Amino acid sequence: MAGLIKAEDVQTVKERANIEDVVREQVTLRQAGMGSLKGLCPFHDEKSPSFTVRPALGVYHCFGCGEGGDVIAYLMGVDHLTFSEAVERLAGQLGITLRYEESNGRGGPRDGAAPGKRTRLVEAHRVAADYYHAALVDSGEARAGRAFLLAKGFDRSVAATFGVGYAPGGGTSLAAELQSKGFSTEEMVTAGLVGRGQRGLYDRFRGRVVWPIRDITGDTIGFGARRIHDDDRIEAKYLNTSDTPIYKKTSVLYGIDLAKKPMSQQRTAVVVEGYTDVMAAHLAGVETAVATCGTAFGTDHIKVLRRILRDEPGSDPAKVIFTFDGDAAGQKAAMKALTKTSGGPRSRLWLLPPPGKTPMNC
């Protein structure tokens, strides 16, 4: 049985963690009086900011929904972590080695006990992302993946910036890599990285170019995979991680980790259609570009953008620009997205036409 984190180590984490920096990962804050910052609450949907942070005291409070506490409570609430998981995440970021109380009569650290569930799932995704990227760079099998990216104008340095990788086609290589790193079958399956069939474990993504999907803090929580081989038995052009305890496709935006600061500064978001569109936009200087991951733009995406863009009554309007293909499917998706933003950030809609045509500005 795992022991408790020593109280003095918990206190050290609380004292050294900067609550302002932690909150700013998901909420845009502005000055609101002596020693106080204000933003839109991450715990409930609101249009007027009622969420306050007092960095000197290390606390937050929302006058709208009543949520409040210290930096550990904040992480527990916003990322659905246990107490231990929140402390472990902060300690890892701060470089603090945690000690654990005696749990089995032998004392010392948690003799072989696994960290919190979320921490383990995120770590499994980090290992997978590193493995996929190394395969893209070094594997002879990934030659087709490198050619695909080069045809799009993305060289090795760009692939490294976005963490793009290649999932080997053998079917079990990632499972073997994760097992070698000490991950259990249950952890691999729960993470959505590995499946379990009649013949044993198999990799979820095989023979495809893969993009790591990161949350707003930069943690990899899922993957998107594109078909590049004609003999791929799965005909779907894109495969995405299914919902897991750390990945909810209805609220995830690809590129949000890179776009959040420019979005906050410019109070503008550009929503494009896919992973390569986000890459191309950022390389062209449009650093506010993001994309949904295998689902339509919806209300949960709006909540994420609203917190970053500070869409508040009385302020200058924030902008969400939708940039989709100009064919019938693109226009239909764009109009649905525009409808979703009614009552939210003010929006502009650009429909990209087929070559030789003029863009449509709605």
Image (spheres, grey):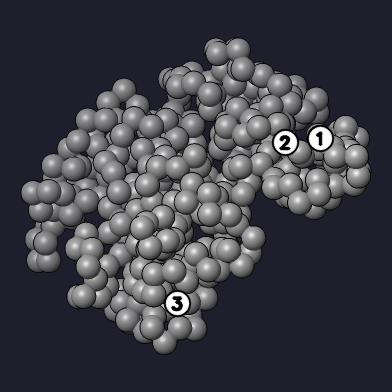
The relative height of residue 220 versus residue 144 in the rendered view (above or below) is above
Q: Nearer the viewer, residue 61 or 118?
A: 118
- Label 2–label 1 contact, CB within 8 A: yes
**From the viewer's perspective, is residue 321 above or below residue 162?**
above
Q: Which mark is residue 84?
A: 2
Q: Residue at x 77, y 45 (%)?
A: 91
**Dividing the image into 4 quarters, which one contains the C terminus?**
top left
Q: Nearer the viewer, residue 201 or 190?
A: 201
Q: Residues within 10 Å of mark 2 (few under 14, many from 20)?
A: some
Q: How far across and how far down the image is residue 146, in percent?
A: 37, 80
Q: Is residue 177 left or right of residue 240?
A: right
Label located before the other in sequence (2 or 3): 2
- Residue 140 shown left or right of residue 337 in the figure: right
Measured Cα–Cα span from mark 2 to mark 3 = 36 Å
Amino acid beneath label 1: Leu
Task: Tell me what residue is drawn at x 38 percent, y 63 percent.
Answer: 199
Q: Which mark is residue 168?
A: none
In the rendered view, would you say 275 is above or below 209?
above
**Residue type at the position of mark 3:** Leu
Q: Residue furthest front?
A: 198
For disc 3, the marked residue is: 136
Q: How many marks?
A: 3
Q: CA distance from mark 3 to mark 1?
A: 41 Å
Say whether disc 2 or disc 1 marks the residue closer to the N-terminus: 1
Q: Position of residue 236 (x, y in %)?
A: 22, 59
* Within-10-Å neighbours for mark 1: few <14, some 14–19, many 20+: some
**Residue depicted at 45% across the width and 22% down the height:** 45
Residue 213, quarter of picture: bottom left
Task: Judge by depth and name the residue closer to the eye, 222 or 280.
Answer: 222
